[in-house]
Image: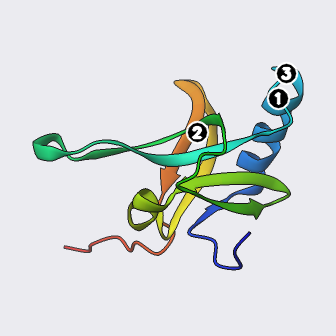
Amino acid sequence: MFDFQPVTLTPKAAEEVRKIMQTKNIPADYGLRVGVRGGGCGGVKLIIGFDKKKDADQTYTIEGIPVLVDKGHTMYVVGKEIDFYEGDEGRGFMFTDPKATALKI
């Protein structure tokens, strides 16, 4: 476990992750994997899911939830916040950058 946490969870996201872990029978030795997929010309896409710890992972406990981040993915998730959205258009997890400021024109 490390003191530095590259990513944070909003209270709503943490609540939803706990609910999923309980209702979907996620194995006790699994954690919330945060990372990236893709690369090249298309860029990278931030992803989350549940997975078992791998050798290249760094493990963090955020809001009481074990979070797994591949060491090679850390630079892509640093400073990101995971939120959970529920609205008329749908519901799901999303990544935000709480330090980003709106550009005023």
Q: Which residue is mark 1?
A: 27
Q: Which residue is mark 3?
A: 25
The amino acid pointed to by label 1 is Pro
> Which class describes the residues within 10 Å of circle 2: few (<14), some (14-19), or many (20+)?
some
> Which class describes the residues within 10 Å of circle 3: few (<14), some (14-19), or many (20+)?
few
- Looking at the rendered image, the quarter that the C terminus falls into is bottom left
Say what secondary structure mark 2 lies in: strand
Which numbered circle lies on residue 93? 2
Q: Earlier in the sequence, mark 2 or mark 3?
A: 3
Say what secondary structure mark 3 lies in: loop
Instruction: Please give the name of the residue rendered at 68% of the width and 53% of the height, measured from the top-left corner.
Output: 67
The amino acid pointed to by label 3 is Asn
Asked if marks 2 and 3 touch (Cβ < 8 Å), the reply is: no
Q: Is residue 77 left or right of residue 82?
A: left
- Looking at the rendered image, the quarter that the N terminus falls into is bottom right
Query: Mark 1 and mark 3: span between their CA atoms?
Result: 6 Å
Rendering coords of residue 80 (x, y %): 50, 63
Q: Is residue 56 above or below residue 91?
A: below
Say what secondary structure mark 1 lies in: loop
Instruction: Please give the name of the residue rendered at 56% of the width and 69% of the height, measured from the top-left corner.
Output: 6
Instruction: Please give the name of the residue rendered at 22% of the width and 45% of the height, measured from the top-left corner.
Output: 39
User: From the viewer's perspective, is the residue at label 2 or at label 3 nearer?
Assistant: 3
Query: Mark 1 and mark 2: span between their CA atoms?
Result: 21 Å
The amino acid pointed to by label 2 is Phe
Front residue (pair 39, 105): 39
Among the 4 quarters of the image, the one containing residue 103:
bottom left
Q: Earlier in the sequence, mark 1 or mark 2?
A: 1
Q: Is residue 75 above or below residue 92?
A: below
Q: Is residue 80 left or right of residue 13?
A: left
Among the 4 quarters of the image, the one containing residue 64:
bottom right
Asked if marks 1 and 3 touch (Cβ < 8 Å), the reply is: yes
